Image (cartoon, helix red, strand yellow):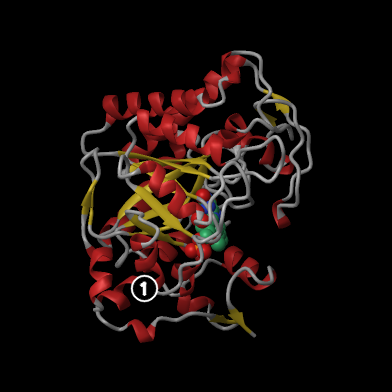
């Protein structure tokens, strides 16, 4: 193995005591493949089993914590105790491969999909219609503003979802505070125009973390971690700029969580506004964090040299791989055993079985041009 890849294979113990065997994480990726009850399906078990032998940690597809927050066809739920059986199987197959497993907890807020919701009604911090084209999951629906009481109910739902994660045998939860979903809707000056205590745009995240920690201390019998995923910027004005991101990072670091995970499609993208710098967001954020909390970089990483660069130049502690691990489930093992040249970098239209990809995800991979590398 190349000398500069060694760092990627160092183990790490998080504050909570969870130990992972290396610095690779599988990025959370929705599979659209839960069964008709939104329980984990056999196909999903096979998909994760195939990918659990190399990475240190798998962060699962996002799971909705309440029915009013469902954001995808075939999204798995973690909203009631009936989900625990399937989730336990998921934790088990991943542990058998030697990886740790973190479930991503989700509420779509104004980006939940009305046709998937019990009463077709989306909710958010304020009644502000989402802007912009989000491709095949675009939602142009004005949400109803949550009452203060309802905000506290959702906080409890995240707590209950954490209890289920513990009972199912997971090693932690990641709060999905990125990509414009409910947590981000509270942080954003675009979507949060509240007049109650949650006009403090960071309070929702902080109260969620407090509740998750309370549940962990009450229920966990082994180390259990809490991570937070954020998107560094929003395109709209007013909206999240790098300045708000620094404020959020301060709050998250004060809350003493196990890791912070950036969400971006390109690790080396530069900031839009809120700071004057030639550097990438990955580097700027790493410099701001300055080693105070483990930081995960991500975005368009396809080779081990690119992963090593994100650790070295990007100064992150971990890298998460998304599409690379969908395309080649054995990417990490190949690097570890000096077979880098055998990594597969694209799919063909006949590769579904070989790559062990559930059909709903496979269909989207073929349909959405330019998303995955598919040679036709
Ligand atoms: C099929 C697919 C599903 C995704 N679902 C999620 C998700 O559930 N939660 C999330 O935070 N990010 C999700 N993402 C974003 C990825 O976690 C990752 O940030 C993005 O793909 C960039 O990494 P990559 O270039 O290595 O693929 C998804 C990406 C893909 C390709």
Which one is in front, 126 or 290?
290
On screen, residue 293 above or below 266: above
Residue 370, x across and y down, in percent = 66, 71
User: As drawn, is 231 to the left or to the right of 142?
Assistant: left
Q: Give the residue pinned by disc 1.
A: 304
| Residue at the spot 30% in from the left edge and 59% down from the top edge | 23
Residue 69, x across and y down, in percent = 61, 36
| Residue at the spot 36% in from the left edge and 73% down from the top edge | 304
Q: Is mark 1 within 8 Å of ligand 1?
A: no
Residue 317, x across and y down, in percent = 32, 54
Which one is in front, 159 or 4?
4
Can the viewer see residue 73 in this picture? yes
On screen, residue 161 above or below 139: above
Q: How many labels does the image show?
A: 1
User: As drawn, is 205 to the left or to the right of 309?
Assistant: right
On screen, residue 370 above or below 14: below
Which one is in front, 268 or 97?
268
Residue 173, x across and y down, in percent = 39, 41
Identify the secondary structure beneath mark 1: helix
User: As drawn, is 252 to the left or to the right of 238?
Assistant: left
- Displayed quadrant of residue 166: top left
| Residue at the spot 54% in from the left edge and 45% down from the top edge | 232
Can the viewer see residue 30 in this picture? no
If the image is split into quadrants, where does the N terminus sit? bottom left
């Amino acid at each position: 193995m190349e000398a500069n890849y060694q760092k990627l294979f160092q183990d790490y113990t998080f504050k909570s005591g969870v130990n992972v065997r290396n610095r690779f994480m599988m990025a959370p990726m929705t599979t659209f493949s839960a069964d008709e009850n939104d329980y984990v399906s056999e196909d999903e078990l096979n998909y994760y089993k195939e990918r659990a032998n190399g990475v240190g940690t798998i962060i699962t597809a996002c799971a909705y914590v309440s029915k009013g927050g469902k954001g995808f066809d075939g999204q798995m739920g973690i909203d009631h105790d009936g989900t625990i059986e399937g989730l336990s199987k998921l934790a088990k197959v991943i542990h058998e491969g030697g990886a740790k497993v973190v479930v991503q907890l989700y509420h779509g807020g104004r980006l939940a999909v009305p046709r998937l919701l019990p009463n077709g009604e989306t909710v958010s911090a304020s009644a502000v219609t989402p802007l912009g084209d989000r491709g095949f999951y675009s939602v142009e629906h004005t949400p109803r503003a949550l009452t203060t009481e309802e905000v506290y109910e959702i906080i409890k739902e995240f707590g209950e979802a954490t209890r289920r994660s513990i009972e199912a045998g997971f090693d932690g939860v990641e709060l999905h505070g990125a990509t414009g979903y409910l947590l981000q809707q509270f942080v954003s000056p675009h979507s949060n125009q509240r007049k109650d205590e949650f006009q403090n745009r960071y309070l929702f995240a902080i109260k969620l973390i407090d509740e998750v920690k309370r549940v962990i201390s009450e229920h966990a019998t082994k180390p259990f971690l809490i991570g937070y995923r954020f998107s560094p910027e929003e395109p709209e004005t007013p909206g999240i700029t790098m300045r708000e991101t620094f404020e959020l990072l301060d709050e998250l670091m004060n809350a003493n969580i196990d890791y912070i995970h950036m969400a971006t499609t390109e690790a080396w993208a530069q900031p839009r506004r809120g700071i004057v710098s030639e550097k990438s967001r990955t580097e700027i954020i790493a410099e701001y964090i300055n080693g105070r909390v483990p930081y995960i970089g991500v975005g368009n990483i396809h080779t081990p040299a690119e992963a090593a660069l994100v650790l070295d130049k990007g100064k992150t502690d971990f890298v998460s791989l998304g599409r690379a691990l969908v395309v080649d489930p054995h990417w990490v093992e190949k690097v570890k055993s000096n077979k880098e040249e055998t990594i597969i970098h694209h799919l063909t239209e006949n590769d579904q079985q070989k790559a062990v990809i559930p059909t709903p995800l496979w269909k989207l991979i073929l349909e959405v041009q330019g998303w995955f590398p598919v040679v036709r």
